[in-house]
Image (cartoon, grey):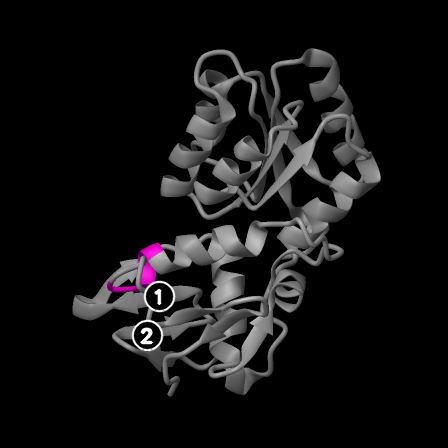
Amino acid sequence: MPEADAHILVVEDDPVTRAKLVGYFESEGYRVSEAEDGQSMWPLLSGQSVDLVLLDINLPGEDGLYLTRQLRALFDFGIILVTGRTDDVDRIVGLEIGADDYVTKPFNQRELLARVKNILRRVPETQSSETDPKRFATWVFDPQRRKLTGPGDISVGLTRAEFELLSALVRHPGVVMSRERLLSQVTHRNWDPNDRTIDVLVRRLRKKIERDPKAPEIIITAHGEGYLFAAEVS
């Protein structure tokens, strides 16, 4: 999908901030819809395709974290949390429940645009042979269809970031991959040693694919180095 064809939904209760976001992304060629809260957001998601949601955390009624959990259970589009909160706890919780990125106000519009573009164009940069279905443990991972299937042909949903992380790990079984390398596969952002995005995503993936997430057998922690995909891939 060309980025210019993307549809962005801005959910922001402050009318000034909302107008700035809508105007800026429209000037960049995107189709943009807007809502002031969760209640007015839901009708906009009915009957039309949305590719990415810019979602404020501090909304009246149902806040952005609650809405993120609901949206991720129903949709596969990108979610960027936009908030005035600077607490790391909110950022980590947002990533845990399915947000793809997190931006703190005041933000640079060009930086936000870059993050939006990164999410919209995320596709595995692999050769055709690497897009064939892969089998590991009791799972079948189909990168081309973005599908993860378990025993009994049960399909497990993956967020964009989870999909990208699993793709990177499956392509390099038995290799310790640093957080920096994995982060470049998932967010295309500059490495920050304090960035816990990869750790959060690994925890999310473990909950979905490990028999016991507290004693992982597939995604192993290499202390001080990164993560190792320990399962055989065929």
Task: Report the disc number at residue 148.
Answer: 1
Q: Is residue 177 above or below residue 51?
A: below
The answer to whether residue 16 is left or right of residue 55 is right
The residue at 45%/24% (across/down) is: 43
Q: Residues within 10 Å of mark 1 (few under 14, many from 20)?
A: many
Instruction: Note whether residue 158 is visible.
Output: no
The residue at 65%/55% (across/down) is: 187
Labelled pair 1, 2 in contact (Cβ < 8 Å)? yes
Percent position of residue 198, x then y: 55, 56
Task: Report the disc number at residue 140.
Answer: 2
The answer to which image quadrant residue 104 occupies is: top right
The answer to whether residue 36 is left or right of residue 141 is right
Percent position of residue 226, x then y: 56, 68
Amino acid type indicated by mark 1: Leu
Q: Quadrant of the C terminus?
A: bottom left
Q: Is residue 210 magenta?
A: yes
What's the magenta region? 207-211
Foreground residue, 226 or 41? Answer: 226
Furthest-left residue in this view:
152
Amino acid type indicated by mark 2: Val
Of the residues under marks 1 and 2, which one precedes in the sequence?
A: 2
Q: Is residue 44 above or below residue 217?
A: above
Q: Is residue 12 above or below residue 98?
A: above
